[in-house]
Amino acid sequence: MLSYILSFISLLSKNVALFLRSLLQYIPVADRLVLSQKQQEVTTFSNRKGLECISPFFTSVEETPHVIPTKIQGHVPKWLKGRLLRNGPGKFEFGEDKFNHWFDGMALLHKFEIADGTVKYSSKFLRSDSYLTNSKNNRIMVAEFGTMAMPDPCKTVFQRFMSTFEMPKSTDNCSVNYAVYKGDYYVSTETNLMHKVDLETLDSKGKVNWTKYIAVNGATAHPHYERDGTAYNMGNSYGKHGSNYNIICVPPQTPGSSDSGLEGAKVLCTIEPEDKRRPSYYHSFGMSENYVIFIEQPLKMTLWKFIAAKAMGRSFLDGISWEPQKNTRFHVVNKLTGQVLPVQYYSKGFLYFHQINAFEDEGCIVLDLCCHDHGGALDVYRLQNLHKVGEALDQVYNSIAKPYPRRFVLPLSVDPKKSVGQNLSPLSYTSATAVKEVDGKIWCTYESLHNESLEAFGGLEFPQINYTHCNGKKYRYFYGCGFGHMIGDSLIKTDVQTKETKIWKEDGMYPSEPVFVPEPNSAAEDSGVVLSVVLTPKKNQGSFLLILDAKNFTELGRAEVPVQIPYGFHGIFVP
């Protein structure tokens, strides 16, 4: 997302004078007088004590470029064959300069090769321009989400002063996820830049810029896919009149053609923010069989603060604010026509990062998300917090609103004969409501997709489903990480019909996002395995790839890795 803003800045400014003029047009008069640091709310959402120090997970590690064997405990199913690819930060400083936020670390790509009951491991830092530039200069030269690159101390005083008005470079540190376009694999973040990756070597095969194909300044790291290979994504665009949200469509590769990557990409639909100068931050979106669902949440990006960040010595993170007095709005777009449905859906404000699934039923969209009741999660994951110990760590954890799975229902049309105050949802299996208001808008209230037992596990995030068979369709099961710590400390399988859960948890072990792999030739939704990379901060124990039977959620085996692995974000399984 920060690169959307960086691209916006570069469009506004070519030199200092233009920069200042552009800056002033976005700063309200009152705000020009005082540029105060945002106030931190002190709110408690839990009362957990005695949390284990997890600092080793956010410490720089060495890459493992040559494939190494793992030690198998239990067994690996013979049918399981392919590569588990993971992505996340692995280097948190250059020379004396240290990054400030978890999201800032340099991308470390991981690969677990699974075949014939064995598992091999390798990892490699993405040789991005950001990584190479920082390495060459032994300092942070490229701004990241929570860290602004400071002026070069080797420059003169005047040069350093003038450099504060230069446009920050757009980062190509693609540390969030893998994406697939036309059969090619890319690592991505939330910027306009991706890297095409060789899955054999984990080397970059070249940098790819979204702006060379369509008029957007970036895209999310969570595209959705049709069964024919068509990919959908979202990205912002910026101009002299402010910002827009865009739905992106990348067609599948045409048989017999040589087109690849982003060729043929188009903007399917453009959506105006409620405030074009202060668009919402978003990390993902929903997709059903016929519709894309964009959630405009009250986590706002103030554009002038992004523009002024370097001159003010602030990071891009400081330009994002939670505004709980505002509601959340749902935008529904027809994938075939590119038209936004005229119905306006709202709910009480919430923060979300990841959607679980969305499907259509009886003229409605059923949308399942992991939701927070407070928007402070981004700010909390500064590295100084993740390195805390004892009561200080407990206090940080207890200040975070826990994520819980929730279901919303969005009627695709509104009968004008329906009475004000009437629930328009016809679905008997959910308590989620969609109530018509006097002004014709629809007020949505959620159904909790969990029972009370989930609270003991700190809520749930990093949700995954049997994507191949269930994405955009009615489904029953999803998998995620329980967040009894700052990061996942358990794995949870949830039945959305009964709200019953199955749990995997071991003391002192911290699993990553679960990845579901279906068993070949099986029709059952939960027939397969769940893979998760499990870490421990204990020096006398190592990391391992955990393999669970997805149906009963019991351990089949684990592949122990004799190297330190940092806690990452997302990944995919490639058969």
Image (tube, grey):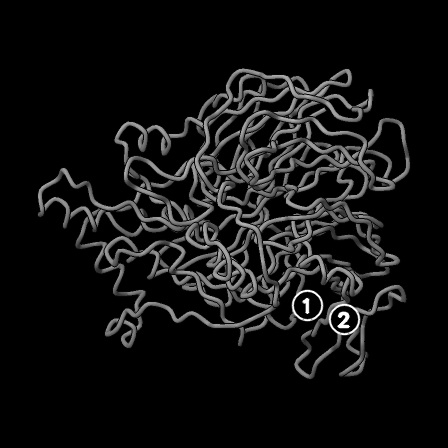
Q: Quadrant of residue 110?
A: top right
Q: Nearer the viewer, residue 539 or 102?
A: 539
Is 37 positioned to the left or the right of 339 in the image? left
Q: Is residue 519 above or below residue 160?
A: above
Q: Which residue is mark 2?
A: 414
Q: CA distance from mark 1 to mark 2?
A: 7 Å
Q: Residue furthest front?
A: 540
Q: Is residue 24 left or right of residue 533?
A: left
Disc 2 on helix, strand or loop? loop
Q: Residue 163 in the image: x percent, y percent? A: 18, 46
Residue 117, quarter of picture: top right
Q: Secondary structure at mark 1?
A: loop
Amino acid type for the residue under numbered disc 1: Val
- Name the kind of residue labelled 2 in the image: Val
Measuring from the top left, give residue 420's x and y in whole percent.
76, 83
Looking at this view, is 183 or 377 the one in front? 377
Total labels drawn: 2
Label 1–label 2 contact, CB within 8 A: yes
- The numbered disc on residue 343 is 1
Q: Earlier in the sequence, mark 1 or mark 2?
A: 1
Question: Residue 404 location, x and y as percent?
Answer: 69, 60
Position of residue 297 measured from the top left corner of the image (x, y, whole percent): 56, 64
